[in-house]
Every structure is written in C-alpha cells, then in structure tokens.
Image (spheres, rainbow, N blue to C red):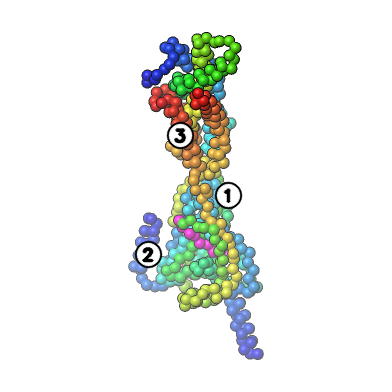
Amino acid sequence: MSSLKLFLCLFLAYCVNGQSCIQPSVSPSSYSSTNQKLSKSTAFVVEFSLKCASKTDNLQLYADIDGVQFPVTKSSESEHYQVSWTVKDKKTVAHNFDVRFFDEEGYNNLRKVIRSGQSPESIKPLFNVDFQHPGLSSGFWIKAEFLGLAVAVLVLYVVCRERSQIIS
Amino acid sequence: MAPKSSNFSKEEELLLQDFGRDLTRKSSLIFYMHAIFVSALPLWLFNRIHQMELTEHAILFAIGTLVSTYLVASAYKNNKFQLKHKVAQKRSDGVAAEINSQMAENDSKKVSKKEKDERILWRKNEVAEAESMQLAVVYSNSVFLILLILLSFFFFKSYSPMINYIISMIGASGITALLSTSSKN
Amino acid sequence: MKLYLGIVLLLLTAFAKGDDEKAKIILVKRILNDIITERNDLAIEYNLYNIGDGVATDVELADSSFHESDFELISGMTSVKWSRINAGSNVTHAVVVQPLRAGDFNFTSAVVQYVSEKGVDVTFGYSNEIGEQEILSLKEYNRLHASHMMEWGLFALWCMPSIDVPLLLYYLSKRKYSKKVKKN
C-alpha cells in the first residue's frame, strides 16, 4: 500500500512538474515546398497544437524524423508547437514522413538506444504525425520553346529540301 | 545562273518571265491574305506568353502587323519570281503530257501544232504560277516563323515585352524579305 | 560566403575569451527562395548557433518584419522559444509566407533573446539584415518561368493552315505532273 502511494505521489509529482504529457491530443498541420522553380531547397514544417490532461509548463518535446532528432519549438504565446527542417540544394522526392514526438525522458532513452546500436523503433513516442511530401516538382523536363524551335526547324528543313530540288 | 537546256524559243521564254514579274490581282490578294495571317499569328504568342494585353498595345500591334505584312508579301513576290521559271522547266514535260492526252480525247478536229504549243505554254504558266506561289508562301512563312521564335524567345527573351515585339517582328520580317532578294541556292 | 567567414571569426574570438560558462547565440536568417514572387510561397530559414561554452536557456526568437499588410503567413510561427540550446549545438527554424504585393521589399533582422548564464539578465542578439529584395509580379514570373506548353501547342495549331495548306497544294500539283511524265 505504501509503495503504491509512493509511486502515485512520484507520478503526480512528475506530472505536476510539467515534463510529461498524459493523454496528448494533437491537431497537426504540415507544409513542404513543392515548386522547384522558386527554390532549389525544400523547407518542411510540422505544426500542431497540443492538449494534455496534465500541466505542460516545462514540457520540452523532441521530434525524430527518419533517424534525425530535432528539438521542437513552442510559440511564445499559445500552446502551439512547431518543428521544421530544411534540405538544401537537393531535389527531394515524394516521401511519407513519420514524425515521432518524445518528451525529455523518451528522448534520453532514444539517444541511449541509438548509441548502443539498438533499433530506435523500440522506444514508443508520445504521439506521432504522418505527413506526405509530394516532392519538389520542376515541371516538364524540356522547355516549351525548345520544342517549338525543334518543330520549326523540321518544317524549314522539309521546305528547303523541296525548294532546292526545284532550283537545282 | 544561265537557264539550262530549254526547248522553247526566246520569245516564249520572255513571255514567261514577264508573266512572273507582274502579279495578277488574284495572286496579289492571296499573297496579302497569307501575309496578314502569318503576321497576326505572333500576336497569340505575345498575348499569352509575354502577357501583353491586346487592348493595351493595340496601336503597336496594328503597326507591327501591317509592316510585317508588307515585308512578308514582298518576300513572297521575290521568292515566287525566283521559283516560277524553274518550276515551269520542271513541269514542262508533265504539262505537255497532260495536254497531249487531253487532245487525244477530243480527236474530232486536228489541232495545229502552234495551237497545241500555245495551250501547253498557257497551261504551264498556270501551273508554274500556282506551284511557285505555294512554295514561296511556305518557304517565306517557315523562315519568318523560325526567325520570330529565335528572336523573341531566345535572343531577346529578357527584354521588355514591347521592345521584344518590335525587334522580333521587324527583325523576322525584314530578314525574310532580305533573304528573298538575294539569289542564293 | 562572407556570412560564414564572419561566423568563423566570431567563433575564434569566442574561444579566445575567458572560460566562464557563458552561452552566446548567433542568429542567421536566410531566404531559401531563388525567386520571390507575389502570391507564391517564400521560405525563410533561421539558424541559431550556440558558440559559447554554456547552455543558453529561455531562448526566444521573434521576427516582426512580416506585417500582415504585406505578407500572408502560410506555415510556421514567427515568435517561438526553445527552453535550452546546449553549448556547441544549433537549431533550425523555418517560416513560410506569401508576399501580397510585388515590388522591392526591405527584409530586416530578426531578434533573439536568451539567458546566457544563470542569474544574468536577458541578452539580445540580432540576425543579419538581408536587405532589399525584389518581389516579382505574378505576371512577370509567369512570363519568364511558367511552362507554356498549352500556348505553344495552340500556336502550332494556328500555324498549320498557313503552312500546311499551301504545302499540300504544292505536293498535289507536283505529284500530278510528275506522274504524267512517268506514265509516258
């Protein structure tokens, strides 16, 4: 009984400390660059507002995306969070990202697991967000005016051949 | 550029030449219609791709189209004149065969050789006129369009749309006309 | 390039200083776009490097240069905070906006505030100024960069009567008179 009480107290203390989130409810939105003509780099942004059953004053979240960890930043005013990353000067292809979010403890565990060479999948995230990147598109690989020029050259060639036949 | 082995007399040749210089009214009309059509074609490109509003640049477009029409029409005339004689030579056998077969059909009265030759000459003139016109139109149009594409979308692509239009149209039609006056090939 | 040289120099001076555990944050603001046009996405990247020896706490980044009258916020937040940035590490932040008007725009600095040492007042830092950049009008952008396949296709269509019809007539006539020669 006493050990259970102790456990409960510790647990509550942990929650009141604000370092973890119980029953997270997330409403995410995401963005990724898709127009290669505007920019050769791709920006990825995942935003969400988070509601927890517990207090979240000191909550520091970390995101794990394809094996790379990023700290999650929080809005100065509201309960809105954002994680963003960029890929520079490389054409990014369509990819389905599984963004896993961890609290401080989960993040430390994740780091330990990675250092020891085990699979990072074993650590369960607090929650995760899926988002689909459609890929950086640059349109058709050949420019329309080159095509137009090619057709015009073809026509001119045929016509010139006829003409030289006559003139010769 | 001396004419090759010709099997008609000097005066017949002269006749043919004369026919070539002056344009009949019908030919003139056809030429001007083709010229104005081909000069108006680039307007589509300039409106849609260079984003030039038709109403905004109406005066510029009208002047450009008219100048280009005149230059392209003169290119047609010169090209046709160059070609007509040669076409006539090439088609002379074919026309002779056609007239002969026609004569053979109406074999009721005997036609004098002179009349037959006259008919052949006349028909040859007709055919040469038509073919040289078609070929001149096609050739000049192709040259004009290719020059227009090169000037407007490659060399002067980054210039302001108005300058682009003026240079491309006058350049393309001017060079087409110039090429037609030189007796190359 | 100059920017990164500057950062390296700062890093060197930082290491040349004393060894009290102070944090120092460098904020670098970058425009990711090659071309900026109105009503098309513009992505801005913020990099915060902690080149000091200590942990920076209560790091807040704020960029107020994107007024609602000039830009529409598409994604990301312009006022964010991190609870800590360790010594020697860096974080990235991205914001995506859409300019509402074409013309030249002066992109100014963003501000970062942080606590470099326990018990010390908040330190402020400013990012680099990007300066004046041209925002292309949508018209100009379409003129230079949009694919115009449809327009060229239709143009080819309009050209056809003026080239194909005379060519066809010529070929017909040519064939007719060449045949007659062959027949005989």
The chain letter for the residue carrying disc 1 is C
Report in which chain the residue with disc 3 lies.
A
Q: Nearer the viewer, residue A116 or C33?
A: A116
Picture disc at residue C174: none
Whether tag 2 and tag 1 are in contact, CB under 8 A, the answer is: no
Q: Magenta includes C55?
A: no
- Answer whether labels 2 and 3 touch (C-beta < 8 Å): no
Q: Using the rendered image of the protein, determine whether residue A92 is visible from the camera's viewpoint.
A: yes
**Mark 2 or 3, closer to the camera:** 3
- Numbered circle sitting on residue C69: 1
Query: Which amino acid is tagged 2?
Result: Leu
Q: Residues within 10 Å of mark 2 (few under 14, many from 20)?
A: some
Q: Give me the C-alpha separation between circle 2 and circle 1.
A: 38 Å
**Where are the magenta residues, as a range?**
A81-89
* Residue occupying the point 41% across, 26% down: A168
Quadrant (top left, top right, bottom left, bottom right) of the N terminus of chain A: bottom right
Residue C111 can be seen in this image: no
Q: Amino acid at mark 1?
A: Ser
Tag 3: amino acid: Tyr
Q: Secondary structure at mark 1?
A: loop
- Residue at mark 1 to residue at mark 3: CA–CA distance: 56 Å
Picture mark count:
3
Identity of the residue drawn at 56% across and 69% down: A100
Name the residue beneath numbered marker 3.
Answer: A157
Circle 2 residue: C11
Q: Residue at x 61, y 85 (%)?
A: A7
